[in-house]
Amino acid sequence: MKTILGLIASPRTLGNCELIVKEISNHITEKHELQLLRLQDFNIKPCRGCYTCLFRSKKCVIDDDYSQVLTAIVNADALIIAVPTYCLGANATLKMFFDRCVASYSYANQLWNKPCVSIGIAGINGMEGSTRLDLEKFTSLMLFDNKATEILYSALPGEVFMNEKNLKKAASLGRALFGERLQDNGPACPICGGKSFRFLGGDRVKCLLCSQTGYISMESGSPVFDITKEYGIFTSREEAQNHYLLLKDKRTEYRVKRELLNQIIQHYLDRGNWIKP
Ligand SMILES: Cc1cc2nc3c(=O)[nH]c(=O)nc-3n(C[C@H](O)[C@H](O)[C@H](O)COP(=O)(O)O)c2cc1C
C-alpha cells in the first residue's frame, strides 16, 4: 500500500486545490492511503539565511513545524501538490516552505526522484502569471520527479469541477503519478525541460527554470533553443550533491574573507532609522 501526500497550499477548506487533490487520488493506479497536509495549518517561519542547517546537526535552528512537514514529504511514496494563484504567481505559503529547502538537502537521497504531480489553480483564464514556473521550480529544487504540471482555471470553491476538461485532466494526472510522464511537446529548454524564458536581446534567451542561457531560432515555424549547460543543480543526483557541497564551501570562503567583509559592512552600520513593530 502506497502513501500519497496531498500537499495543499490553499487556506480554503474544500477549495479547488483540496478538491483537485482528492479527485486526482481517485485515479491513482496503485492502492494507496491519501494523507492530506494543508500548509496553512502549520507554523512555518521565514528562512533566516544562516545556513546552520548545512552544518552541525544538519537541522534548521528555527523552532516551528517545518520538520514535521518535511518528514511527511520524506515518508510519502508520492505527492500531489496543489497551489492557488495569488497575485500572478503561486501563493506565498508555498514559497515560505520552499525557502527553507536548504534544510531538506540532508534528505536528498529520500527526496530524489519521488514522483509527484503539481497543479496550480487560477481564478481567471490565462491569469496564472508565474504559477507554472513556481511549481516547476519547487518540484525541481525539492528533487522530485514531476510527472506533470497543470494549470486549471476556476475562481469559486468547487467551480473546478464545473468544467469537464478539468475532471479529465485530474484523471490523467492520477494515472501519470506512477506511470509515464505526461508528454508536452511544446517548446522547452533542452537542458531541464523548462518552458519559461527571458529574452536577453537579439536571439539570446535565458531559461527561467535552470537559469542557463543560449539562443533561440525558428525552424519550420517553431522555436528551437540552443542552450549550453554551465551549471546544474537538479537534473542529476550528482549535480544536487555538488550544489550542496558548493553551499558548504561558502563557510570556508566566509572564514577567509570575514575580516574584509566586516570592513565593508561597518560603513553601513548606522545609516538610516529602522522602523520596528
Ligand atoms: C489574494 C488573492 C489573489 C488572487 N490572485 C489571482 C491572480 O493573480 N490570478 C488569478 O487568476 N486568480 C487569482 N486569485 C483567485 C484564486 O486563484 C482562485 O480563487 C482559486 O480558485 C483559489 O483556489 P482555492 O479554492 O484552492 O483556494 C486570487 C485569489 C486571492 C484570494
Image: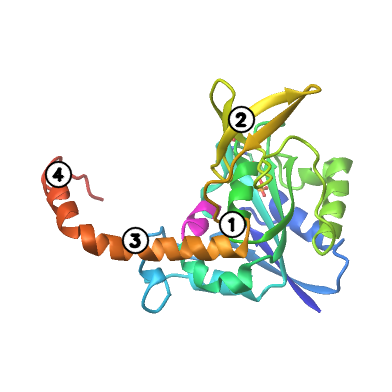
User: Given the image, on which type of amino acid does mark 1 rest?
Assistant: Phe
Q: Which residue is at the front of the view, 4 or 49? A: 49
Predominant SS along the magenta part: helix
Residue in front for this viewpoint, 72 or 208: 208
For marks 1 and 4, give the CA distance.
37 Å
Tag in front: 1 or 2: 2
Q: Does residue 95 belong to the magenta stretch?
A: yes
Check the image and report above or below for 170 versus 59. Answer: above
Classify 10 Å Cα crowding around label 1: few (below 14), some (14-19), many (20 and above). Answer: many
The residue identified by callout 1 is: 234
Tell me: residue 135, above or below residue 4: above
Q: Which residue is mark 4?
A: 268
Q: In what element is the residue under mark 3?
A: helix
Q: Residues within 10 Å of mark 2 (few under 14, many from 20)?
A: some
Q: What's the residue at 63%, 53% (across, down)? A: 12
Q: What residue did someone put label 3 on?
A: 250
Question: Distance between the Cα atoms at labels 4 and 2?
Answer: 41 Å
Sequence-first disc among 2 and 3: 2
Q: Element under label 4?
A: loop
The residue lying at 63 percent from left, 46 percent from top is 84
